[in-house]
Each structure stands twice: as structure tokens, then as C-alpha cells.
Image (cartoon, rainbow, N blue to C red):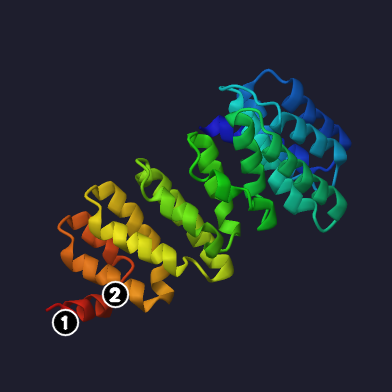
Amino acid sequence: GGHKKHRSLILRAMAHTGLNEARDALIWQLTEGSSASLRRRVPVALSEFPKPDTLIVEALLAVNASNERPPDGNVSVNAGLGLGLYEGQIREQDPALADKIRVEIEAQINSAHGNEMLAGALAAASNIADAKANAHAVDYVNHDDFNVRRNAIYGIRHLPPADLEASYIASLDRDDLPMIGEQWAQMLAKGASTTQTGLSQGMIDATTDKLWKEPDPKKRIALILTLGIAAPNNATVRRVLAEYFHQEKVTDLKRYAAKFLSVQDIANANQAKP
């Protein structure tokens, strides 16, 4: 752990110098280097280079599109992450180069050969704080490949809940709901913190319905978490969670639901019970 962290810090310190020699050394490490563990760390370092630089964009695009197989597959995905982060870093200084990144990432999503390449392109898009750049996420959140699905879900935090409703409701029937549901919830929460909208009414209704019927406690946790995001701004959701709190038999889940409720919410639901 420790010395891997030091490697990342050294690479980032090199990038922060803004020197062409540092840029060239990092690009060489990314494109020619033999250590997969070092190559995985270079894209994030390059994304922190303080100036807009076409060579950095071209190197990250090439590696992102290279569709490398594991164990180097993460290098392609990380190049996507680096691209998305660099787009935000340079947008004010060089809007044209930032736009080029967006156009290229969209082209890679549309023409991806294989799931690794698609996952990498979706990872890149998810780091761009823009709804248009992430419009594709909706098409891939229920994809058969786990990495594609996961990277698409990262992008949903930039989209309005109304655009996500159908894909979200379809995801509630997946076997991997405990993992994917938690990720949906985290990304919806991030969206809620930036747009104040959180969940649409259709999402709330479908989640509530599923929560009352779901026999698997692990899946119920993901559903509670999703409703918990909407709870602060929605009295109806708090009432649903409070009613659920009184019905739930598993102590840990009861406690978890209570995290999103006030003592008054719980008392009100208790009084309302026939």
C-alpha cells in the first residue's frame, strides 16, 4: 500500500511542474512502459498537468481506445478517467481542446469494439460534469458486462432523474441489486447534491413497491439507501420509511432505515398505525 501511494505522489508531482520534459516522461511511461501498476497511475497524474496540451490528450485517447486485456485493461479505463478529469481541468483555458475530448469520447462510445473499450469510454464520459456528455449512460446501465454497467452508472449523477426513470426501474429486478443498487444510490445522491432533485416520483414509487415485496435483506438495504436520499426533502418518503421501520423484523435493517428518519417521523408512523 505505502509505496504504491508514493509512486502516485511522485507521478503527480512530476505533472504539477508543468514542464514538457515531465509530460514527455509520463507519456512515455503510459504508452511504452512495462509496469502495468505504474501505467495505471499515470493517467490521473497527467490529468493534473496545469496547461492544456494536445500531446496529453492524444496519448490518453490512444490508450483509452486500445482495448487492452486485463491485467492491463485497467490502464485503458484509467486513461478514460484521466481524459474526463483533464477535460474539466483545461475547459476554461482551452475550450476547443476540451470540446475535442468530448467529441472523441462520444465517438469511442459509438464505435467501441468490445466491452473493455466501451467501459473505458463510459468511464471517461462519467468524469465530465455535463448531461449531454453522459446521455449514453442510460443505454448501458443495464448492460450484461459488469464493468460497462458500473461505468455507465457513474455517469448518471450528471443526468436529470426523469431521464433515468425507465433504466432505474429495470435495474431493480437485477440479481446484482445489492451492489448495483448501492452504486445507483450513491450516484443519485451526488446528483441530488448538485441539482437538488434526487429521485423522480416514478423512481420513489417503484423503489417503495419493491421494498415492501423484496425477501432478500441485502437487496432491501440498497432500496432503503435509495429512499434515504430522497427522505430529507420529501415527507411522503419519510412516512414510507417510518412505516417500513415498524414492519421490518431484521434489527440491522431497522437501524439502517432509522438513520434517515427523525424520532418524530418514527413516532408519527406509530400513531398512524391502526
Given residues 20 and 36, the one toward you in this image is 36
> Which residue type carries mark 2?
Arg
SS type, badge 1: helix
User: Residue 256 location, x and y as percent?
Assistant: 28, 60
Q: Is residue 38 above or below residue 246?
A: above
Indicate the position of residue 164 as horizontal and vertical percent values.
52, 57
Q: Is disc 1 in contact with disc 2, using a CB cutoff of under 8 Å? A: no
> Which quadrant holds residue 129?
bottom right
- Work out which quarter of the rendered image holds the C terminus and state it: bottom left
**Quadrant of the rendered image containing residue 175:** top left
List x then y, in percent, for residue 138. 56, 50
Amino acid type of the residue tagged 1 in the rendering:
Gln
**Distance CA(mark 1)–CA(mark 2):** 12 Å
Give residue 78's position: percent from left, percent from top: 64, 36
Residue lying furthest top in this view?
Answer: 34
Q: Residue at x 36, y 58 (%)?
A: 225
On screen, 76 above or below 249?
A: above
Residue 110: in sight, yes or no?
A: yes
Q: Residue at x 18, y 60 (%)?
A: 248
Q: What is the number of the mark on residue 239? A: 2
> What number is the disc on residue 180?
none
Residue at numbered disc 1: 271
